[in-house]
Image (tube, grey):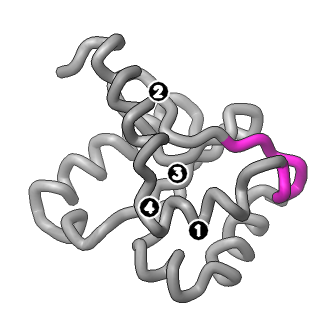
Amino acid sequence: MKNSKSLTGLAKKLRANPTNAESVLWAKLCSRQLEGAKFRRQQQIDNYIVDFVCFDRKLIIEIDGGQHNEASFTEKDTKRTNHLEQKGYRVLRYWNNDVLQNIDGVVYNILEVLNK
């Protein structure tokens, strides 16, 4: 388990070096473009760093690469999602390919959740 300072440093590094999929989605989430929701990227929540979070709407968005298909990642992702949901967050997960090849569909889905 990492301490808070090391997670903060890691979050800063992740913000400075986003994946292509994260950059594409961030371009749609930043500046309150979706229903006025303020998203932040690479934020620490407890012992986790989430890709995107809207604290006001309690919504987390995770962008997953192919490694998340492996059993070890699947177990960690399930544990992580359960923990975040217990804190009252809704967690949406999208594959990198979905974001890169169907950004309009991803944004539409996020808007549906924001409007619930």
Near mark 2 (Cα within 10 A), the count class, few <14, some 14-19 or many ≥20, is few
The amino acid type, in three-letter code, at marker 3 is Val
Disc 3 crowd rating (10 Å Cα; few below 14, some 14-19, many 20+) is some
Circle 4: residue type:
Ile
| Residue depicted at x 41% and y 73% | 95
Residue 109's x, y, as percent? Answer: 68, 72
Measured Cα–Cα span from mark 3 to mark 2: 13 Å
Whether residue 40 sits left or right of residue 76 in the image: it is: right
- Which circle marks residue 32 in the picture? none
Residue 35 in the magenta stretch? The answer is yes
Quadrant assignment for the C terminus = bottom right
Which numbered dot is residue 45?
2
- Taking depth in this image into account, of 113 and 68 the one nearest to the observer is 68
Of all residues shown, which one is farthest toward the front? 16
Secondary structure of residue under mark 3: strand
Q: What residue range appears in magenta?
A: 32-39
Who comes first in sequence, dot 2 or dot 1? 1
The residue beneath circle 1 is 24
Q: Is residue 98 magenta?
A: no
Q: Which label's residue is closer to the chain start, 3 or 1?
A: 1
Judging depth in this view, the residue of 100 and 80 nearest the camera is: 100
Q: Mark 3 points at which residue?
A: 91
Distance between mark 2 and mark 4 Cα atoms:
16 Å
Pointer 2 or 4: first along the chain: 2
Badge 1: few (under 14), some or many (20 or more) residues near its Cα, within 10 Å? some
